[in-house]
Image: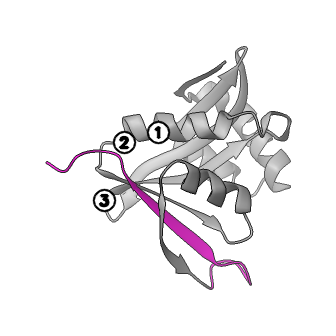
């Protein structure tokens, strides 16, 4: 069973290690450390071991935005990403929750559609020859 909690500074090495395994580099280490220190990073744990993480904040036109959702390769295809997305939906303080993924990341696109997110736009020129697809879901009733 997966549990989810807010990351603490003590979790920085584990988060950076998982990211480096998935990304193939340590280029995001400073960004990850900053997200943890600002309270924007949540961890997925199985048997007390960190198996994934997500970064969420309200920087996308004052809406909640999931910037990263990373699951250690040994724990992929076990529902960890889905559980993390569902959790982030419950803590989002805004009525809309956005996320994005590259056109090449079909796994994330399928997850978004499975969870009821709708494709709301595509942006080119961020990554060469791999457009960024944006998804949105209403997770709160408008006030």
Mark 1: give few (<14), some (14-19) or many (20+) Cα within 10 Å.
many
Quickly name the residue at label 2. 92
Q: Are marks 3 and 2 in contact (CB under 8 Å)?
A: no
Mostly what secondary structure, the magenta segment? loop
Could one spot residue 39 in this view of the protein? no
- Magenta stretch holds residue 23: no
Query: Which of the numbered marks, if any, corresponds to residue 88?
Result: 1
Foreground: disc 3 or disc 1: 1
Up-down relation of residue 14 to residue 54 (above or below): above
Please tell me which of labels 3 and 1 falls first in the chain. Answer: 3
Q: Is residue 86 left or right of residue 103?
A: left
Foreground: disc 3 or disc 2: 2
Up-down relation of residue 32 to residue 13 (above or below): below
Residue 129, by quadrant, is bottom right
- Residue 117 is situated, as x and y percent measured from the top left of the image, at 48, 56
- Residue 57 is situated, as x and y percent measured from the top left of the image, at 42, 49
Up-down relation of residue 130 to residue 73 (above or below): below
Q: Which residues are magenta?
A: 125-143
Please tell me which of labels 3 and 2 falls first in the chain. Answer: 3
Tag 1 secondary structure: helix
Q: Residue at x 48, y 33 (%)?
A: 87
Q: Quadrant of the N terminus?
A: top right
Q: Residue furthest top?
A: 47
Tag 2 secondary structure: loop
């Amino acid at each position: 069973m997966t549990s989810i909690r807010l990351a603490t500074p003590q979790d920085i090495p584990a988060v950076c290690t998982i990211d480096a395994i998935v990304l193939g580099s340590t280029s995001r280490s400073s960004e990850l450390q900053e997200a943890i220190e600002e309270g924007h990073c949540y961890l997925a744990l199985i048997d007390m071991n960190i198996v994934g993480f997500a970064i969420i904040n309200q920087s996308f036109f004052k809406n909640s935005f999931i910037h990263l959702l990373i699951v250690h390769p040994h724990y992929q295809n076990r529902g960890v990403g889905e559980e993390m997305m569902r959790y982030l939906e419950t803590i989002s303080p805004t009525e809309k929750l956005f996320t994005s993924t590259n056109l090449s990341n079909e796994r994330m696109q399928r997850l978004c559609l499975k969870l009821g997110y709708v494709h709301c736009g595509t942006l080119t020129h961020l990554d060469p020859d791999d457009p960024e697809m944006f998804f949105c879901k209403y997770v709160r009733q408008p006030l």
